[in-house]
Image (spheres, grey):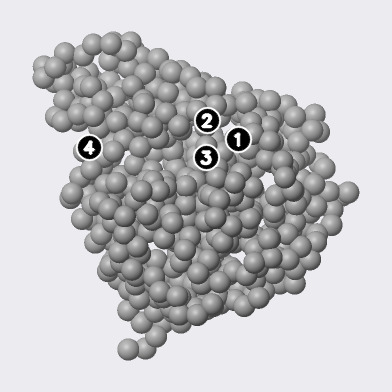
Amino acid sequence: MKTKRMAGVAASILAGSLVLAACGSSGDGSETATGGAATGGAASGGIITANSNEPQNPLIPTNTNEVGGGKILDLVFEGLVYYDAEGAVHNGVAESIETDDSQTYTIKIKEGLTFTDGTPVTSSSFVDAWNQGALLSNGHLSSYFFEPIEGFSYDEDSELTGLEVVDDTTFTVKLKQPEADFPLRLGYSAFFPLPEAAFEDPDAFGENPIGNGPYKLDGEGAWEHNVGIDLVPNEDYQGDRTPQNGGISLKFYETQDAAYSDLLAGNLDVIDAIPDSAFGSFEDELGDRAINQPSAVFQSFTIHTELEHFAGEEGQLRRQAISHAINREEITDAIFQGTRTPAQDFTSPVIDGWSGDIPGNEVLQYDPEKAKELWAEADAISPWDGTFTLAYNTDGGHQAWVDATMNSIRNTLGIEAEGNPYALFADLRKDVTDRKMTGAFRTGWQADYPGLGNFLGPLYGTGAGSNDGDYSNPEFDALLAEAATADSVEASSEIYNKAQEILFKDLPAIPLWYSNVTGGSADTVDNVEFGWNSVPIYHEITKAE
């Protein structure tokens, strides 16, 4: 059988077709993406200041699944591949990724690459890191991403037997079944390499990670918890994402309003989240420096499968009632003023294969009478008592929509409903991860890679690391597995959308809306562009010294 050569990454059936439709194509229409090794060296220019939030955990790639930590890891590390602003795939560390059956992949990495401690990036840097992330006893949040590899187990500690080091620049990956889009996932942080120092003292490493990307931490103490983190260009970096500035200083804000005020006052260069208080004015205030564009971000709230009144038949009825009780059109118009779109599914319209006509999605329509009817049916099984709560973090600008959503539920169903505020996102995520939530809680998903399956498997697959509600449905899992083995994007998208029909019945999460990326920049910086996943392309931003 002829080998499919993926000099860029994606197999011929995938390349180009998974570029985000809303953002355009990669440009040349070719069937492979390519990446070269640019000349390294320290960049010149001023230091870019940008907003962010305190990461939930120490900065271990396989144990980071939230945006604050993800932003940092994507700057400090480089994976086998990376995604450009439009979501197209390019080689990073990989020289080539080859397969003849979409089940066994041979990966060759570029020679001469190093981590910032001077140690070489080798095949073992990937194999050892993936094994650490996949090991059950380590409990890493992104372990789910290694499930397709032979040897992965949810039941016991098990080595990834599908990984084999051939030599310092070659390793092979054998999957449990053919999965043609496996290379597309390899730009996600779970698949980043690690130096030997990461295994010698993981705790110390998580506080001061040693990467191989375009930036590095600016010495000891660069990460001041709950304040910010300072990154400087990695002078030994040889990839395509060469910094065009003197560094990135990410400031951790308690509120988006504070960050936006700093932007207007000239104390912040770039912001990637406009507070709801400024939705009606920011485009006028920032002019052509304002950003308001579609992105691969989905917003929802989750109700744990074992929460009282929300399990079994009663729970299914109540979940559907609550969904029908939310006036998404009114909330997105009044609160978000054109920066959000009511959800029609569990993914994102900017991803190829998206459909707004999935059977069962009528449960997302505001229908007060249907909501009351379903709630009454649930009360006949077990009468409702108490208050329906929705936990959210106030440092993310969520209070206005939470209040509006709770008002909609309260007025429609005639029950007590209120928000449950957390001051910090990290604190909310800790209680979610530790399964301490006693009500519903805010959730959402910023895509790791541009594919429909990324919005489904990690959040709702049995045992998945971001399955915060511990949802499990064997029929849904079977469809995920079937979609993963499909031989084309079109075929897999049809199966993923069929799997969503099950989600619309069970509603493990209540879809709310799709987010535009709303942001902007001060006149202190140039070349500000936001990517397909709503994150600024930091390395391209320029600033005078």
Q: Which mark is residue 425?
A: 2
Nearest to the observer: residue 291 or residue 246: 246
Q: Position of residue 317 (x, y in %)?
A: 19, 27
- Disc 1 target residue: 53
- Disc 3 target residue: 57
Q: Is residue 373 above or below residue 65?
A: above
User: Is disc 3 placed on a helix, strand or loop?
Assistant: loop
Looking at the image, do the residues carrying marks 1 and 2 touch, with CB atoms under 8 Å apart? yes
Which amino acid does the dot numbered 3 rest on? Asn
Mark 3–mark 2 distance (CA, rounded to whole Å)? 11 Å
Nearest to the observer: residue 168 or residue 47: 168
Identify the residue shown where x is 27% and y is 15%.
Answer: 413
**Front: mark 4 or 2:** 2
Identify the residue shown where x is 63% and y is 37%.
Answer: 52
- Disc 4 target residue: 506
Mark 4–mark 3 distance (CA, rounded to whole Å)? 31 Å
Q: Position of residue 169 (x, y in %)?
A: 54, 78
Identify the residue shown where x is 60% and y is 35%.
Answer: 53
